[in-house]
């Protein structure tokens, strides 16, 4: 697919065919490499990395992820010069290449999926000068982040699919009409008529998935205050805290939940909410991310949420795993 935007800078995002021959089209791609949320930046020289271009990349891609108790960057950036961009580095799952070419008439961006490995996303911005390069990047940077996020989720799910807990998947399907790729290690902690709580507990940490539904009435239910109120009602009722009189709640004052429209959520239109959970009348807390959508088949407003607990440890990667499970959602076709 090609996307054309008529702006002060003419941007052309061309999705290139991954292969040029039948042999290339049919052969299996190598597995991509790279750390979690790691982006390899390919520059022509050190001045690009140390100057305005590198500053723009770092300012956006390494901004702190919202809703985490400790400051953690959304991505990790590594860089290499184009002269050393060998086949080994071409297997990185997320690649961003920089090109400044004065002979170019306009700035353009090109993207390719699974060019040298899979899953993989390659993006290249070419421009006649640094100013137009930065302007184009600033205009499209949220799209690039979405693409890299998709690659990260797919990489995680490729691992989880091999250890999918079929019993849990069936239990979710029977209750809600869709499946999730939940790996072994989770168990069903609570199973109520419109509520399910899955847990994976280790000595010092807990990864949790919650699914609940309420009747869908109107679009006002997607408003932030409505989403927060629904979360507090459902989880406060079914998720108790460790001490008497304590229960699940939502941190509002210090880290207000951030609600955005989810990008390419498999159920269709959905609202993503990121923030901090807390235990009322107790001192526990941690990050959560949820996805809420209307199921037109059942008339229900459904939320799939992941929340994580591990005191004094980084939590970005663990929360990304729970986010990936939510994105594995797949409707179950009704039996005829």
Image: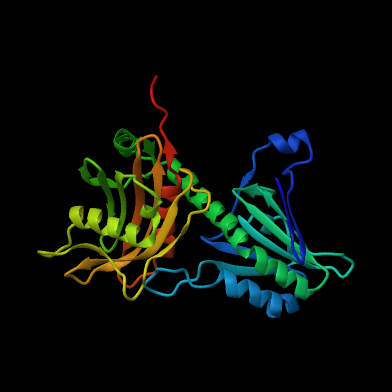
Task: Classify the position of the N terminus by image quarter.
Answer: top right
- Res. 181 in view: no
Measured as percent of width and height from the top left, residue 253 is found at: 31, 75
In the image, 72: left or right of 137? left
Residue lying farthest top?
336
In the image, 22: left or right of 197? right
Q: Quadrant of residue 9?
A: bottom right
Give the colour scheme shown. Answer: rainbow
Q: Is residue 294 above or below residue 220?
A: above
The residue at the point 65 percent across, 77 percent down is 55
Measured as percent of width and height from the top left, residue 28 is found at: 64, 38
Q: Is residue 160 above or below residue 244?
A: above
Q: Which of the pair 210/258 is nearer the observer?
A: 258
Q: Which of the pair 202/10 is nearer the observer?
A: 10
The residue at the point 24 percent across, 53 percent down is 234
Measured as percent of width and height from the top left, residue 103 is found at: 90, 67
The residue at the point 18 percent across, 54 percent down is 237
How many discs mark residues in the rendered view?
0
- Res. 117 in view: yes
């Amino acid at each position: 697919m090609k996307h054309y935007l008529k702006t002060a800078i003419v941007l052309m995002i061309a999705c290139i065919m991954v292969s040029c021959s039948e042999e290339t089209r049919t052969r299996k791609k190598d597995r991509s490499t790279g750390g979690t949320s790691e982006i390899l930046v390919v520059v022509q020289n050190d001045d690009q990395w140390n100057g305005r271009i590198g500053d723009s990349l770092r300012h956006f891609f390494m901004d702190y992820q919202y809703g985490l108790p400790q400051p953690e960057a959304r991505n990790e950036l590594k860089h290499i010069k184009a002269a050393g961009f060998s086949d080994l580095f071409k297997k990185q799952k997320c690649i961003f290449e920089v090109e400044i070419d004065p002979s170019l008439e306009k700035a353009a961006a090109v993207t390719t999926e699974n060019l040298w490995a899979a899953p993989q996303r390659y993006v290249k911005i070419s421009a006649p000068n640094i100013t137009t390069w930065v302007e184009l990047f600033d205009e499209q940077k949220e799209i690039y982040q979405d693409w890299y996020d998709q690659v990260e989720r797919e990489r995680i799910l490729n691992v989880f699919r091999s250890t999918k807990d079929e019993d849990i998947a069936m239990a979710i399907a029977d209750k809600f009409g869709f499946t999730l790729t939940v790996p072994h290690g989770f168990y069903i902690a609570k199973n109520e008529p419109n509520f399910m709580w899955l847990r994976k507990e280790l000595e010092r940490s807990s990864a949790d998935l919650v699914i609940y539904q309420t009747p869908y009435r109107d679009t006002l239910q997607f408003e932030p205050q409505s989403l927060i109120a629904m979360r507090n009602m459902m989880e406060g009722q079914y998720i108790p805290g460790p001490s008497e009189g304590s229960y699940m709640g939502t941190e509002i004052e210090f880290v207000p939940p951030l609600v955005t429209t989810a990008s390419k959520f498999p159920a269709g239109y959905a609202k993503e909410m990121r923030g901090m959970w807390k235990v009322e009348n107790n001192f526990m807390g941690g990050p959560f991310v949820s996805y809420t959508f209307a199921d037109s088949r059942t008339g229900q407003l459904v939320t799939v949420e992941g929340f994580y607990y591990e005191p004094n440890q980084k939590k970005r990667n663990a929360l990304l795993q729970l986010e990936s499970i939510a994105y594995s959602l797949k409707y179950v076709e009704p039996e005829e």
